[in-house]
Amino acid sequence: MILLLFALSVHSPQAIARALVEKYDAAWMRKDAAGFAALLSPEYVYFSSDGKVMDRKAVLSMLASPEYRIDAGSRDEFRTFVSDSAVVVSSRWRGRGSYDGKPFTDDQRCSVVIAVTPKPAVLAEHCTNLSAISSVSPAPAAPMPR
């Protein structure tokens, strides 16, 4: 019985989505554009905290750019929300690096939307800067997805 419950939990939509987010973040941190692309839906879109919308091609181009450097990044505070074959993974992303020579520090609440069937893929991500929400005068948005 315990083995059956374990097997069911390993293949639950939540477990599939969390595993995909872990791969997504690992590929991002390695700047592995090909590995990252393999996890994305053809219709992938990123919504930034400053209102910009980046399609799959733009995000992959930025990730592969030598002008983009990621020095540190981590995700925690996970919650998952399931509806049929879609899962929204809510989390907090913290990272730092530079883009076009300008340093950035991210502290963001993110939602990653994942289609778990037929093949798990990331459909979208939206991140909101927490520092902009909690400060009296909003901080400038980070230039990077995440």
Image (tube, rainbow, N blue to C red):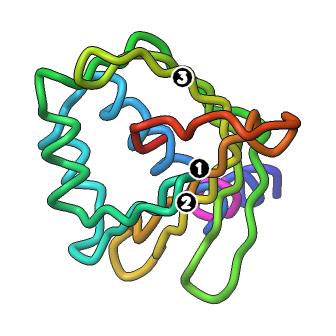
Q: Residue at x 61, y 68 (%)?
A: 13
Task: Give the residue at mark 3.
Answer: 95
Judged left or right of residue 11, residue 56 is left
Which amino acid, mark 3? Gly
Q: Which of 50 and 42 is in front in this view?
A: 50
Q: Name the residue under label 1.
A: 18
In-image side of 57 versus 16 (left or right):
left
Q: Residue at x 67, y 34 (%)?
A: 139
Quadrant including the N terminus: bottom right
Report the front residue among 78 and 51.
51
The residue sitting at 70% across, 58% down in the picture is 9
Q: Give the range drawn in magenta.
A: 7-12
Q: Distance between the residues labelled 3 and 1?
A: 19 Å
Residue 27 position, x and y percent, is 30, 33
Distance between the alpha carbons at the discs numbered 1 and 2: 16 Å
Placement of 58 over or under 22, stated as above or below: below
The Cα atoms of the two marked residues, 3 and 2, are separated by 15 Å
Q: Earlier in the sequence, mark 1 or mark 2?
A: 1
Q: Which mark is residue 126?
A: 2
| Label 3 or label 1, whichever comes before in sequence order | 1
Looking at the image, is 74 positioned above or below residue 51? Answer: above
The rendered magenta stretch, by its main secondary structure, is classed as helix
Magenta stretch holds residue 82: no
Would you say the residues marked 1 and 2 are in contact, meaning their CB atoms lie under 8 Å apart?
Answer: no
Q: Is residue 25 left or right of residue 57?
A: right
Three-letter residue code for mark 2:
His
Q: Where is residue 46 in the image (x, y as percent from the top left)?
A: 41, 61
